[in-house]
Image: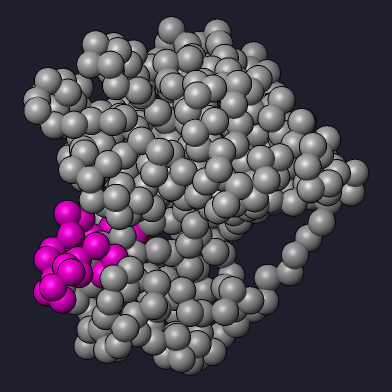
Amino acid sequence: MTSDPTRELIPPAYRTKVVEPIARTTIAQRERLLHDAGHNVFHVPASSVAVDLLTDSGTGAMSAAQWGSMFTADESYAGAASFDRFRGTVSEITGFAHVLPTHQGRAAEKLLMRALVQTGDVVPGNGHFDTTRAHIEALGASALDLPCAANARSSTAAPFKGNINVNALADVLSSDARVPLVLITITSNRAGGQPVSLDNLHETAALCREANVPLFLDAARFAENAALAQRSDVELNDSSPAHIARAYFDLAAGCTMSAKKDGHGNIGGFLALRDAALAKAITPSLILDEGFITYGGLAGRDLDAIAIGLREALEPDYLRERLHQVDALWQMLHALNIPLVAPAGGHAVFIDAGRWLAHIPWNEYPGQSLVAALYRTGGVRACELGSLMFGLLPDGTERRAEHEFVRLAIPRRVYGHEHMCYVAETFARVAEMRQSLRGFRVTSMNEPLRHFMAKLAPL
Ligand SMILES: Cc1ncc(COP(=O)(O)O)c(C=O)c1O
């Protein structure tokens, strides 16, 4: 191995203190498990998965400091010291004075939307997450995605594909539409974990100020957004991730947060607000739906673990390694000529299964075919984001999804380079049999959110 002697040596960010064995299964066993699961990997037992890339949500490894804090946590119903530490950390990172704990991100979304949104309203954003959209629509309002133009060119790399289309937003804000808030998701999960630039958020904030509409952030991956922004924006070179993240929060009236991502929590979330009156108005719903204002559906030990996890998520060495790992997997798959969403996102690699398995028509779910092949071949669990997930209409008919993607979401601090190499090796085997892969049909539970519950049969 050759090494540049002028470059500072950077050691890996972690060593392992606790190990969890991965059970070995044979192809024959995985075929049986797939069959029993109706070819839907949501129903495969996790104990039979070798590398689990289904989601990065709540699946991360906690640090020794987080585990340690759980022993000294305060489980008092009201006024727990754990809540003080949680609130202190959230306020310090975000600058928002009012912190409402929730059991996970979607509960924070529900509280915010119910407080601000009415029937007939329009809520624009760069790309709403599914649960956000569902909460807005449940109130009889529309969730309007306005992704930037670069977002449509999935295989062409651009630094800030999570940006909102500010011209389209300006049009909406100057129209007759009633807009109670604008919500920007950092990073944009819909766009494969692509970041939003600080310039784009400045422009969005200016438009919101002019229209007197509050701007909120979905901050689930705020630290990854800061790290990706730093990588692409030379003006941020000398800033810390914490400083950059704060610049984003300073432009907003508040944020919803799933602490299961950049909070390094296995559960948890919060709604953080600048406005005392809004926080006061939401408090009764918080108590009714989640719990008292100092725990909100969480144990004291979760509050402490998240307080520490939020700080750890902003550590430069951790973020460097995190982005490097996602990028390394992206590069290995790219070297196999697999069509990918470019560039690598902050938390996931997206494969364009519609292009890679072009012989399988959209209504036979090429993404699901790839997901099943990855599990069968190597016990790698991935997630379809295509016509199986998005194609079913309320009247029972199907439409073609915008893309036939498969997502490899990488849990935080769980896997090392050898796991990524194993995933790439699994893809290399699948590549050899690519032309022989077949599509699927749905045999039962063809209902809303069917990707979770549907049973399928190979064609
Ligand atoms: C961007 C984004 N917002 C909100 C949520 C919902 O968070 P939770 O799963 O904690 O309810 C998710 C979950 O994946 C997400 O990715």
* On screen, residue 141 above or below 398: above
Q: Which region shows up in magenta?
A: 388-406
* Residue 193 position within the rendered picture, expressed as x and y whole percent measured from the top left: 40, 41
Main SS of the magenta part reads loop
* Residue 115 position within the rendered picture, expressed as x and y whole percent measured from the top left: 40, 38
- The extreme right residue here reads 72
How many numbered discs, if any? 0
* On screen, residue 403 above or below 345: below
Q: Is residue 357 left or right of residue 36?
A: left
Based on the picture, tell me whether residue 417 belongs to the magenta stretch: no
Residue found 60% across the figure and 37% down from its top: 100
Which color scheme did the rendering employ for the protein? Answer: one colour
Of the pair 205 and 211, the residue shown nearer to us? 211
Of the pair 166 and 457, the residue shown nearer to us? 166
Quarter holding the C terminus is bottom left
* On screen, residue 246 above or below 446: above
Q: Quadrant of residue 418?
A: bottom right
Q: Quadrant of residue 433?
A: bottom left
Q: Is residue 280 visible?
A: yes
Q: Quadrant of residue 402?
A: bottom left
Q: Is residue 259 visible?
A: no
* Residue 302 position within the rendered picture, expressed as x and y whole percent measured from the top left: 73, 48
Residue found 71% across the figure and 40% down from its top: 294
Quarter holding the N terminus is top right
Q: Is residue 41 left or right of residue 69?
A: left
* Residue 135 position within the rendered picture, expressed as x and y whole percent measured from the top left: 35, 51
